[in-house]
C-alpha cells in the first residue's frame, strides 16, 4: 500500500537511506536538510566529523548495496580502495601487529563526503523525492496521538503521514515530543572524552608494505591513544589520531608527537615523512548517547528515528553509519508488513532498531568502561565481558579460526553469540 507523503529530517547518510526506503511506499518524500549541499566531495558544516576517517563496516556496505545496487562498485570506480580486512588492514594491539588472515570479507574505504555524494545523487534521481536544502526544522506538528508533519524555521508546515527523524546526535526529538504531550525516551549516556585530529596525506604504494590500511588501538587502562590510516580516493590517506579521556592532539606538534608515540611504525612513518595535503581538523565527542525509544509505552504514530538520533556511538569503533544503513533496511521490511502508518509500526520499528544497536553498543560501552575515568551507568557484567574480550583478542592473534569469527562479529555479519559458543570458548582457552 502506498501512502501520500513522508518527511525526512536530515540529509546525511541516515536520512538518505531512509528516503530511499520511503520512496518505495510514499508518493512524495521531502528530505529537509539544514546545510546548503554542493555537488562536491568537501566536508560540510553540518557533519563536523565528515573530514575524518570513516569506516562503513561490511554489514553496512551490504545494506547500502541492497538499497542502492552497485554502490560499492561505483565507489571503487571513483577511486575508493577495496580489500579483505584480515589481509589488507594492518592492525596493532597488545604490543604487536597481528598476523594477516584471509577472511573472505570485502571492505571498501572512501571518504565520507564521496560516499554521501554518491548516495545523494541516487536519491535525487528517485521519482517523488525532493531534497530541500538550506532549510531547518523547528518542531514536530501533531497531537497527543499522531505526528502529522514538521514546522520549518520560516513557520511553514510540511504535512506528512510519516516523519523520519535523522537529525543526528544533536537532534531535539526529546523536546519536540514533550511539546506535543508525548513521553520522551529515556537516555543513557557515557562520558568518554573522545576526540581525534585528522590530516590528509599523499598515499604512496609502499607506505604500509603489503597492507592497504593501518589501525592501532590502545591496551586499557594504561594506554589511551589510537590511530588510523585509511586509503581513500585521489591516492590519499586520511590519518585520524585520537584517544579516550582527552588523550588526543589539538595542534600539529601534538599530532606529530601522538603519531610517533603509537606502536604502529607505518602510521608514524606516514605522518613523519609523508606529504601533507590538508590542514589539521579536530573533532570532539565527549559523550556517547543512546535514546531508548523501544521502552516507550506508547510511541506516537507517524514518527520514527534513525541513525545518531537513536544511538550516537564512540566514533573510534566505526559503527554509526552501519547501524543507520541496517536500520533503513529494517524499516523497509516493516513497511512491507504494516499496511498503515500506526503506533504499532513505530513500536515495531523502535524494537527492531534497539536490536540492531544492542550488539555494537554493548561492545563499545564495554570497551569504554575498561577505563576507570568513564562515567555513566556501567553495563551489567562489564568486567567479565572485558576480561573475556581481552582473552578473545589475544587468541585472535594466534588462531586464524578465532580471528575470522571475531572479525565477522566486529563487522556485524555474525551474531555475537558465535563468540561465546562452547566450541569458541574452548578454542580461546586453548590458545596460549
Image (cartoon, rainbow, N blue to C red):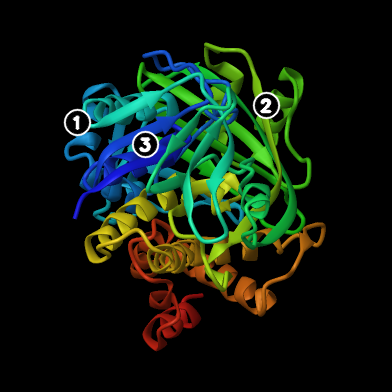
Q: Residues within 10 Å of mark 1 (few under 14, many from 20)?
A: few
- Marks 2/3: CA distance? 26 Å
- Whether label 2 touches label 1, CB < 8 Å: no
Which of pointers 2 and 3 indicates the residue nearer the eye? 3
Q: Position of residue 166 (x, y in %)?
A: 49, 42
Dot 3 corresponds to which residue? Answer: 16
Tag count: 3
Q: Looking at the picture, does residue 56 appear above or below residue 98?
A: above
* Residue 114 in view in this figure: no
- Whether label 2 touches label 3, CB < 8 Å: no
Q: Residues within 10 Å of mark 2 (few under 14, many from 20)?
A: many
Dot 2 corresponds to which residue? Answer: 282
Say which element carries label 2.
strand
* Residue 187 in view in this figure: yes
The residue drawn where x is 20% and y is 33% is 73
Say which element carries label 1.
loop
Q: Residues within 10 Å of mark 3 (few under 14, many from 20)?
A: many
Q: Looking at the picture, does residue 115 appear above or below residue 348?
A: above
**298 or 353, which is in the foreground?**
298
- Marks 2/1: CA distance? 39 Å
**117 or 430, which is in the foreground?**
117
- Earlier in the chain: of badge 3 and badge 1, it is 3
Say which element carries label 3.
helix
- Marks 3/1: CA distance? 14 Å
- Earlier in the chain: of badge 2 and badge 1, it is 1
Q: Position of residue 271 (x, y in %)?
A: 59, 22
Dot 1 corresponds to which residue? Answer: 127
Q: Residue 240 occupies which quadrant of the picture?
A: top right
Q: Residue furthest right?
A: 373
**118 or 371, which is in the foreground?**
118
Amino acid at each position: 500500500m502506498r501512502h501520500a507523503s513522508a518527511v525526512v529530517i536530515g540529509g546525511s547518510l541516515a536520512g538518505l537511506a531512509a528516503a530511499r526506503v520511503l520512496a518505495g511506499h510514499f508518493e512524495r518524500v521531502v528530505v529537509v536538510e539544514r546545510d546548503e549541499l554542493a555537488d562536491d566531495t568537501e566536508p560540510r558544516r553540518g557533519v563536523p566529523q565528515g573530514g575524518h576517517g570513516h569506516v562503513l563496516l561490511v554489514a553496512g556496505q551490504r545494506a547500502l548495496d541492497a538499497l542502492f545496487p552497485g554502490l560499492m562498485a561505483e565507489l571503487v570506480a571513483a577511486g575508493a580502495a577495496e580489500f579483505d580486512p584480515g589481509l589488507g588492514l594492518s592492525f596493532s594491539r597488545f604490543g604487536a601487529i597481528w598476523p594477516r588472515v584471509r577472511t573472505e570479507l570485502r571492505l571498501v574505504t572512501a571518504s565520507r563526503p564521496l560516499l554521501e555524494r554518491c548516495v545523494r545523487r541516487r536519491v535525487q534521481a528517485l521519482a517523488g523525492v525532493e531534497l530541500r536544502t538550506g532549510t531547518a526544522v523547528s518542531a514536530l506538528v501533531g497531537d497527543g496521538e499522531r505526528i502529522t508533519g514538521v514546522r520549518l524555521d520560516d513557520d511553514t508546515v510540511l504535512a506528512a503521514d510519516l516523519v523520519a527523524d535523522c537529525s543526528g546526535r544533536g537532534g531535539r526529538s526529546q523536546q519536540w515530543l514533550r511539546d506535543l504531550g508525548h513521553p520522551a525516551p529515556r537516555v543513557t549516556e557515557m562520558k568518554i572524552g573522545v576526540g581525534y585530529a585528522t590530516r590528509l596525506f599523499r598515499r604512496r604504494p609502499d607506505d604500509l608494505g603489503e597492507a592497504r590500511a593501518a589501525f592501532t588501538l590502545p591496551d586499557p587502562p594504561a594506554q589511551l591513544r589510537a590511530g588510523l590510516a585509511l586509503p581513500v580516493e585521489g591516492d590519499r590517506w586520511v590519518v585520524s589520531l585520537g584517544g579516550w579521556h582527552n588523550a588526543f592532539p589539538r595542534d600539529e606538534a601534538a599530532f606529530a608527537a601522538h603519531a610517533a608515540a603509537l606502536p604502529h611504525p607505518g602510521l608514524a612513518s606516514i605522518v613523519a615523512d609523508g606529504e601533507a595535503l590538508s590542514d589539521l581538523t579536530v573533532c570532539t565527542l565527549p559523550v556517547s548517547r543512546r535514546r531508548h525509544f523501544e521502552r516507550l509505552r506508547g510511541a506516537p504514530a507517524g514518527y520514527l528515528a534513525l541513525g545518531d538520533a537513536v544511538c550516537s556511538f564512540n566514533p573510534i569503533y566505526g559503527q554509526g553509519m552501519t547501524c543507520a544503513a541496517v536500520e533503513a533496511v529494517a524499516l523497509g521490511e516493516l513497511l512491507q508488513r504494516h499496511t498503515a502508518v500506526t503506533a504499532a509500526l513505530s513500536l515495531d520499528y523502535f524494537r527492531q532498531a534497539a536490536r540492531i544497536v544492542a550488539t555494537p553498543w554493548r561492545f563499545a560501552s564495554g570497551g569504554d568502561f575498561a577505563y576507570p575515568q568513564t562515567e555513566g551507568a556501567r553495563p551489567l557484567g562489564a568486567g567479565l565481558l572485558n576480561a573475556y574480550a581481552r582473552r578473545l583478542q589475544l587468541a585472535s592473534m594466534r588462531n586464524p579460526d578465532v580471528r575470522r569469527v571475531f572479525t565477522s562479529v566486529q563487522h556485524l555479519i555474525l551474531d555475537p553469540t558465535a563468540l561465546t559458543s562452547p566450541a569458541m570458548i574452548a578454542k580461546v582457552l586453548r590458545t596460549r
